[in-house]
Amino acid sequence: MIQAQIYIDKDELKGTKPLHQFIMQLLIDNGIAGATSFVGHSGFGRHHRLKQPAQHFSFDETPMLIAFIDEDKKVKKALTELRKQYRGGFIVTHVVEQW
């Protein structure tokens, strides 16, 4: 099994739809067993600019993480499809064992 973690900005759009909703729908459409999204309280990326959005809606690029685990083939297929439609964000994958 593979776990994938997709790091994006919460307020980013894909067309007129929030990016995180677009990704979740893509995962559903690709038969992924389940996924969870997390909103970060603070974070920074390669430019080392600390992002600390207020607790209310903010334009300060709130960090967000979408994580999911499934069979290797399904995860790779879903990520390949995602990359065909969206090139941003940062994706990390690693092999996991289900207990």
Image (cartoon, helix red, strand yellow):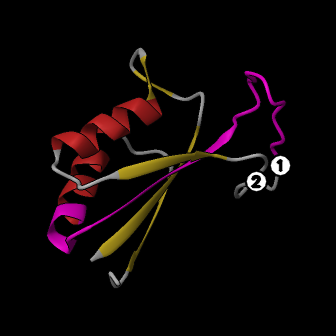
Which percent across, then down, holds residue 88?
Answer: 47, 45
Camera-side residue: 81 or 47?
81
User: Image point 16% across, 50% down: which residue?
Assistant: 31
User: Image point 37% across, 51% down: which residue?
Assistant: 35
Dot 1 falls on a residue whose secondary structure is: loop
Quadrant location of residue 98? bottom left
User: Image point 80% across, 43% down: which residue?
Assistant: 51
Which percent across, then down, holds residue 57?
Answer: 73, 21
Residue 85 vs 76, above or below: the answer is: above
Q: Is residue 67 magenta?
A: yes
Q: Is residue 21 magenta?
A: no
Say which residue label 2 marks. Answer: 44
Which percent across, then down, holds residue 69?
Answer: 33, 65
User: Image point 84% across, 41% down: which residue?
Assistant: 52
> Would residue 84 be visible to someone looking at this image?
no
**Which quarter of the rendered picture does the C terminus lie within?**
bottom left
Q: Residues within 10 Å of mark 1 (few under 14, many from 20)?
A: few
Circles 2, 1 touching at the beta carbon (< 8 Å): yes
Amino acid type at circle 1 is: Arg
Dot 2 falls on a residue whose secondary structure is: loop
Amino acid type at circle 2 is: Phe
Camera-side residue: 57 or 76?
57
Q: Residues within 10 Å of mark 2 (few under 14, many from 20)?
A: few
Q: Which residues are magenta?
A: 51-75
Say which residue label 1 marks. Answer: 49
